[in-house]
Image (cartoon, rainbow, N blue to C red):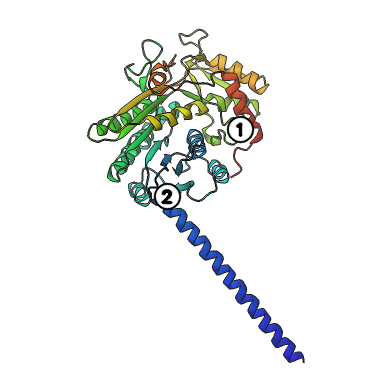
């Protein structure tokens, strides 16, 4: 009896193990089939679906662009090396849009020509939004070669890959830094481009590469020169989370928030002797939600063989001192402020004339109250004291 009972139990155990193995195999096959199906969606053009490659899509501005594109039913591939981007932003986006064929993330460096070529070979892109770039004026003066390589050389490789694989639409993320310090304000698209720091020079070189190539092709190109970006997703899903080591280089909004949270002892204002109304620099602050809306409109209006160049700003400037006061009100914290010497490569006053983008694309900034934009961003900062959780 003991022998027969042991045998029956042994047979039952084998059957359970066999059944478990079969179930595991089926799950594996289903997942593999699902992955293959998803991969096919990205590798083939689909009628009615626009597949956009977003370089730097894990970064502050790029991630907001991805969110808007997904909301508007685009198919999106993010390529990012995470040197400045954040995998946490990607995880948030993947959680919001988990459906197969909506979003994929590829870890790659745009400076790797072989990797870039493989990405274009494996995927069927309809358009590219090119955000990926190092983007700090002060850092560019200290590391100019890094900026020329990262911005100019990488853009060249990207455009070459687009040409080789027949991708016909490019939305290029440029900057008002290409204008340098013009003799008169506001800045129009006809204002001479005389950049005064490596960041602006590298961006202008990239623009020139794109424009010169466009003369020999039917590529649809939109170049957006935008001003100082602030704010975050109004629904609190995404925000700005720069790396700690970049706090000295980063945007003034990030520094204000760090000071308000006690991460740094106070705010450092560089330059109080400029020829402006209060001695500090004047900048045109554009909310990231408005900025991304301009990119989507640019994508919709891109035409083969044409190059559109547009300033993206509010048309008005705020001084750094005014910005700091707005930040104090938005955070409710009386941030300590230290006034220091000028930062190398900075310029006194920059604000845009956005009339061209209104006349041609019907785009106009809606979120023009600096304090309100900072309040939205501050809510995200308070809810994510350590940035993203990834």
Tell how many labels.
Answer: 2
| Place of residue 104 in the rendered image (x, y in percent of width and height, measured from the top left) | 47, 48
Q: Can you identify the residue that label 2 sits on?
A: 42
Q: Are marks 2 and 1 in contact (CB under 8 Å)?
A: no
Quadrant in the picture for residue 305: top left
- Tell me how far mark 2 sits from mark 1, CA to CA: 28 Å
Q: Residue furthest right?
A: 1
Residue 336 appearing in the image: no
| Place of residue 236 in the rendered image (x, y in percent of width and height, measured from the top left) | 61, 33
Q: Is 379 in front, or is 203?
A: 379
Question: Dot 2 surroundings within 10 Å: few (below 14), some, or many (20 or more)?
Answer: many
| Place of residue 56 in the rendered image (x, y in percent of width and height, measured from the top left) | 45, 39
Identify the mark at residue 110; answer none if there is no mark: none
Tell me: residue 255, above or below residue 385. Answer: above
Residue shown at the point (61%, 27%) measured from the top left: 376
Q: Can you identify the residue that label 1 sits on?
A: 235
Q: Is residue 340 rendered to the left or right of residue 7?
A: left
Question: Dot 1 surroundings within 10 Å: few (below 14), some, or many (20 or more)?
Answer: few
The secondary element bearing badge 1 is classed as loop
Residue 23 appearing in the image: yes
Tell me: residue 54, above or below residue 227. Answer: below
- Quadrant in which the C terminus appears: top right
- Quadrant in which the N terminus appears: bottom right
Residue shown at the point (35%, 51%) measured from the top left: 118
Quadrant in the picture for residue 7: bottom right
């Amino acid at each position: 009896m003991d022998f027969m009972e042991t045998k029956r139990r042994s047979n039952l155990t084998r059957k359970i193990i066999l059944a478990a193995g079969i179930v595991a195999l089926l799950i594996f096959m289903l997942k593999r089939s699902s992955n293959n199906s998803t991969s096919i969606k990205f590798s083939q053009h689909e009628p009615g679906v626009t597949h956009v490659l977003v370089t730097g899509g894990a970064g502050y501005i790029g991630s907001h662009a991805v969110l808007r594109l997904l909301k508007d039913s685009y198919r999106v591939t993010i390529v990012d090396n995470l040197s400045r981007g954040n995998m946490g932003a990607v995880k948030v986006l993947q959680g919001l849009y988990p459906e197969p064929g909506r979003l994929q993330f590829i870890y790659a460096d745009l400076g790797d020509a072989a990797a870039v070529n493989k990405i274009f070979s494996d995927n069927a892109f309809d358009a590219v939004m090119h955000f990926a770039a190092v983007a700090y004026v002060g850092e560019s003066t200290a590391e100019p070669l890094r900026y020329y390589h990262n911005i100019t050389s990488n853009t060249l490789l990207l455009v070459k890959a687009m040409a080789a694989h027949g991708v016909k639409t490019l939305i290029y993320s440029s900057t008002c830094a290409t204008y340098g310090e013009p003799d008169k304000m506001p800045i129009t698209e006809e204002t001479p481009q005389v950049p005064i720091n490596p960041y602006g020079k590298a961006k202008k070189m990239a623009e020139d590469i794109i424009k010169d190539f466009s003369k020999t092709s039917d590529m649809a190109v939109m170049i957006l020169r935008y001003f100082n970006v602030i704010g975050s997703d109004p629904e609190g899903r995404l925000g700005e989370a720069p790396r700690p080591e970049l706090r000295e280089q980063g945007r003034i909004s990030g520094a204000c928030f760090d000071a308000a949270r006690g991460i740094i002892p106070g705010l450092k204002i560089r330059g109080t002797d400029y020829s402006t109304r209060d001695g500090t620099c004047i900048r045109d602050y554009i909310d990231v939600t408005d900025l991304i809306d301009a990119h989507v409109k640019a994508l919709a209006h891109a035409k083969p063989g044409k190059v559109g160049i547009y300033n993206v700003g509010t048309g008005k400037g705020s001084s750094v001192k005014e910005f700091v006061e707005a930040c104090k009100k938005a955070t409710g914290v009386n941030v300590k402020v230290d006034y220091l010497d000028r930062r190398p490569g900075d310029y006194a006053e920059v604000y845009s004339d956005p009339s061209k983008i209104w006349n041609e694309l019907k785009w106009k900034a809606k979120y023009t109250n600096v304090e309100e934009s900072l309040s939205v961003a501050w809510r995200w900062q308070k809810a994510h004291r350590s940035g993203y959780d990834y």
